[in-house]
Image (cartoon, rainbow, N blue to C red):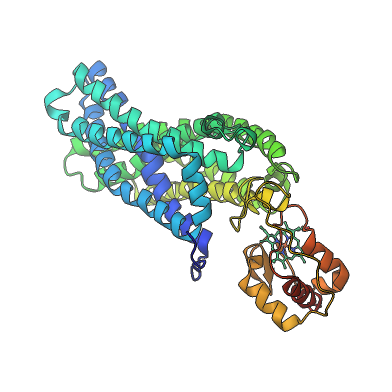
Amino acid sequence: MNWPPIDVPILGRSGLIALIALVHIPFFVNFVMGAPVIAVISEWLGKRSGDARYDQFSKHLATMAFVTVGVGAFGGIGLVATNIGLFPKFFATGAGVFFWPLIMEIGAFLMEAIGIGIYRYTWEKHKHQTRHFVIGWVAALGAWLSGFIINGLASFMLTPGKWVQSKQVIDAWFNPSFWPSFTHRAVAAFSITGFFMIIYSLWMARRSKSEEEKNYAEWSLRYAGKWALIATALQFFPGVWYLTSVERGTSLAAPEGSVVPKLLNGQLTFFWFGGIILAATAILIVYFLSVQSPKYGLKPLGRLGLILSVLLIITTTAFMGFTRERSRKPYLVYGVIYGNQMMVDMMKGGENAPEASGEPIPSAGDPAAGQVVFENGICTACHSLNGEGGSIKALDGVGGRRSLDELHALLLTPPDGMPPVTGTPQELNDLAAFLSSLQ
Ligand code: HEC
């Protein structure tokens, strides 16, 4: 299974996947996990307190969850299709390692989709009955099981853990950052659902005609705000736990060690720290305009503030996702597969290592031919020239920093994090000559 790499204009390959993920994750992962749980809890609160507002909230939330599950399936397919097309080798590895969990994922999705459908459509008829609560929990379980599986795959990519030696799916699934990452996502589910229900409350206020409907919108804004506020504030604890597990997991996985310094004091600090500041700002806005005084929240300026808080929290998820994905560079699976989809043990002389390509021919290289090798090869996945290409290291002026011999030696024995350079000895000479010409 091999085809020429597909170029994605403007966004780049990872950029396209990131864009789909940005829409898919908050709406179709976080919301779909949070909504059934909050709907069932709200129904239960409605039964206990006799307050019909909880019931209305629960029913509307169930409707939204039902629609979202249906639409969300397309986002999932989109992610699978783009990953197959753009990173086929990596996808094959992931689907091979996680084969059985991914088969279980089908069942989980069905449980979630059918469960939420029944829950919604029997809402009036069976409300407050045990069987209705049970079907609500079944729907929630399906959604969480689905998150449980996908979280295994996503956390495996950063901390492959014992799988590297054992090659057992269970080690890949329950890798060193699995539980903290799952907890982080679980809390995010409530936080994001709370934020989306803030928007719902604004919409209910807009279309309210009677005093009663206005009251409901105000009540709902405060109720949704509480979920958003508490869950987002609590996110601090799994966040710290996750970070320590990533520190441990990545230190073990690759010779260059942990990715955490990149987050705390490196090229990703802006996004990581920025995400925390945005979330803190969103919490403050929600506290004042939704939980404290929803009356102000429903005024024009307050509405703007609340919409801003939702945008801030979505940006936070995007920033955090971006730092997680970027911190892995130059790997797709940390310490195991490079960004260009080559396995690390190929370069370490492991069992998959290619045959040695013979003695280099000591003929002079041709820089023009080398440039072609450079541009057609995998180099630009990680290196840039004149600002174009990967972000691992710019190669502008590398010929001034290193001699031709050094460059040649470097291509034969690449530094940590760089895959072996394949090609004929003549191509290596040409490549070295091209690099040397970059003054
Ligand atoms: C998967 C990522 C990756 C790919 C693909 C890759 N490299 Fe590298 N390269 C690295 C890393 C990581 C370093 C070490 C960076 C550092 O020292 O900061 C490096 C360092 C270098 C350096 C030394 C740079 C310097 O300023 O000292 C050169 C030259 C180089 N690579 C050339 C190439 C060429 C030519 C190709 C294509 C055949 C290539 N690389 C492909 C990751 C990659």
Rendered location of residue 438, percent (x, y): 78, 77
Does 339 sit left or right of 398 as displayed? Answer: left
- The residue shown at (32%, 47%) is 73
Rendered location of residue 39, percent (x, y): 29, 30
Rendered location of residue 327, percent (x, y): 64, 49
Q: Which residue is most to the left? A: 125
Q: In which quarter of the image is ligand 1?
A: bottom right
Q: How many marks?
A: 0
- The residue shown at (57%, 49%) is 325
- The residue shown at (68%, 36%) is 247
Residue 41 against residue 335 in the figure, above or below: above
Residue 54 against residue 48 in the figure, above or below: below
Question: Based on the displayed image, in which of its 4 quarters is residue 398 positioned?
Answer: bottom right
Residue 189 against residue 9 in the figure, above or below: above
Residue 251 against residue 375 in the figure, above or below: above
Residue 291 seen in this snapshot: no
Does 381 sit left or right of 113 as displayed? Answer: right
Quadrant placement of the C terminus? bottom right
Residue 342 seen in this snapshot: yes
Does 394 sit left or right of 33 as displayed? Answer: right
Camera-nearest residue between 120 and 159 = 159
Camera-nearest residue between 81 and 362 = 362
Camera-nearest residue between 388 and 153 = 153
Rendered location of residue 129, percent (x, y): 18, 18
- The residue shown at (64%, 67%) is 380
